[in-house]
Image: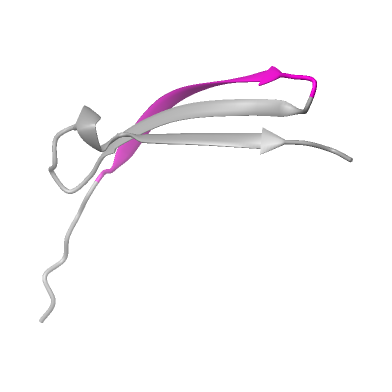
Amino acid sequence: MTERVIDHPYGFGAGFSFETKAGIFSLNYAIGKQLGNPIDFGAAKIHFGFLNQF
């Protein structure tokens, strides 16, 4: 029989975007918690993106 695992993961973050002559640049910071592990700022993720139309 398989043991049932119940988890309530959650995450939060912040980000910003700004326009340059070359396009739109975005930077986001995210962090989360799951399976009883504490929030660890060393495991946070940074995402960046660039949008350009031509």
Image quadrant occupied by the N terminus: bottom left
Image x and y of residue 6, in percent:
20, 54
Relative to 6, is 2 above or below?
A: below
Farthest residue, direction front: 22
Would residue 53 be found to the left or right of residue 13 on screen? right
Residue 10 or residue 6, whichever sits in front? 10
Residue 31 or residue 20, whichever sits in front? 20
Would residue 7 be found to the left or right of residue 2 on screen? right
Which segment is the magenta one? 8-21
Q: Quadrant of residue 49?
A: top right
Would residue 39 be found to the left or right of residue 52 on screen? left
Image quadrant occupied by the C terminus: top right
Q: Quick check: is 33 in the magenta stretch?
A: no
Q: Quick check: is 13 in the magenta stretch?
A: yes
Q: Main secondary structure of the magenta part?
A: strand
Image x and y of residue 37, in percent:
14, 41
* Residue depicted at x 72% and y 36%: 51
* Residue depicted at x 21% and y 32%: 42
Image x and y of residue 24, in percent:
72, 27
Q: Quadrant of residue 40?
A: top left
Would residue 38 be found to the left or right of residue 46 on screen? left
Image x and y of residue 2, in percent:
13, 77
Q: How is the image coloured?
A: one colour
